[in-house]
Image (spheres, rainbow, N blue to C red):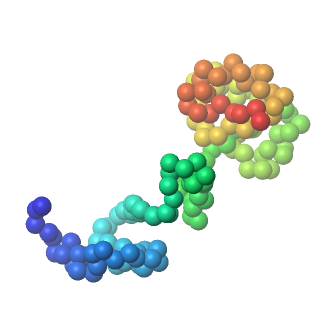
Amino acid sequence: MGKLTKNQKLAAEKIEAGKAYSLKEAASLVKEITFSKFDASLDIDVRLGVDPRKANQMVRGVVSLPHGTGKEVRVLVLCTPDAEAAAKEAGADYVGLDEYIEKIKGGWTDIDVIITMPSIMGKIGALGRVLGPRGLMPNPK
């Protein structure tokens, strides 16, 4: 291993080897020993005490971050004209049907999520070649 910098030595002095820190302690310690001038990322390891080989102990879930990921999600709603007002009110960025189907056929995929109605899935089936590889094809359920 190469020479440690002055900041690395200071950080190493503050960390006790082999000690298990609580999440709160670890977060405050990381903030204290960080010397970077940019927003750095942090990896954490959590011991859950489960055996992944056993089917009843699998861990699956979704976490909603309190401040988001910083990326704004663009939503396209493909719906009938009578449902357009409700979609806009719900916060959709793009709302329509035939004009967006034509744009997507032309290669437009400047969206993150597509929501549609089950009655319209017949028209959207032709877009599978464009939307499928990008993971944008809506689920009819």
Query: Residue 115's spot in the image, x, y percent?
Result: 73, 38
- Residue drawn where x is 73% and y is 50% of the image: 91
In this rendering, does residue 79 appear at all? no
Q: Which is nearer the eye, 58 or 3?
A: 58
Query: Residue 17's spot in the image, x, y percent?
Result: 27, 75
Q: Which is nearer the eye, 97 or 34?
A: 34
- Residue drawn where x is 10% and y is 66% of the image: 3
In this rendering, does residue 34 appear at all? yes
In the depicted structure, whether residue 124 falls above or below residue 45: above
Q: Quadrant of residue 76?
A: top right
- Residue drawn where x is 50% and y is 63% of the image: 48
- Looking at the rendered image, the quarter that the C terminus falls into is top right
Q: Which is nearer the eye, 118 or 95?
A: 118
102 lies left or right of 82: left
In the depicted structure, whether residue 47 falls above or below residue 33: above
How many numbered discs, if any? 0
In the depicted structure, whether residue 19 falls above or below residue 83: below
Query: Residue 95's spot in the image, x, y percent?
Result: 75, 38
Q: Quadrant of residue 96?
A: top right
In the depicted structure, whether residue 123 falls above or below residue 13: above
Residue at the limit of the structure toward the right, as seen here = 82
- Looking at the rendered image, the quarter that the N terminus falls into is bottom left
Query: Residue 45's spot in the image, x, y percent?
Result: 42, 62
Q: Which is nearer the eye, 51 or 64?
A: 51
90 lies left or right of 35: right
- Residue drawn where x is 18% and y is 75% of the image: 9
